[in-house]
Image: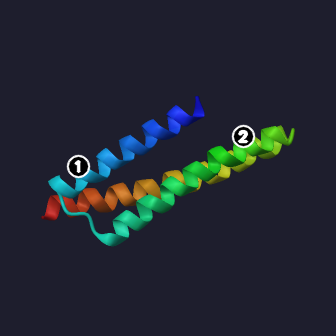
Amino acid sequence: MLFWIGVLSGVGLALLVNWLKKKTTVRWYEWLIGALGLLSGIGAIQHYFGSLGENEPTSAWMGFLLFSIIALILLAIAWALFRRHKRTA
């Protein structure tokens, strides 16, 4: 099951990147901030399941919350930069 989730996520991400490259211009720092946000989100999921595997449910939720907040902030910044850049172009 996790294999198919990874495959579908990879295909979806590749299609999104392809579409963004064709339709608009995205600056390098917007890509970087977005990638850091995605990595933080993936880290949140990994920390959650890793901590549950170690039988630490409190650590799982707290780490998930911490990494998720960081991911949401970074993704919101990347989205705001992208939207602002798109309006002025």
Q: Is residue 62 left or right of residue 76?
A: right
Amino acid type, label 2: Phe
User: Is the residue 66 above or below the residue 26 in the image?
Assistant: above
Front position in the image: 13 or 52: 13
Rendering coords of residue 85 (x, y %): 22, 64
Rendering coords of residue 25 (x, y %): 20, 63
Name the residue: 58% across, 28% down: 1
Name the residue: 25% across, 52% down: 18
Rendering colour mode: rainbow
Density class for disc 1 (Cα within 10 Å; few <14, some 14-19, many ≥20) is few
Rendering coords of residue 59 (x, y %): 80, 46
Q: Is residue 64 left or right of residue 29?
A: right
Distance (Cα) linking label 2 and label 1: 32 Å
The count of marks equals: 2
Name the residue: 45% across, 40% down: 9
Density class for disc 2 (Cα within 10 Å; few <14, some 14-19, many ≥20) is some
State the residue position of label 1: 19
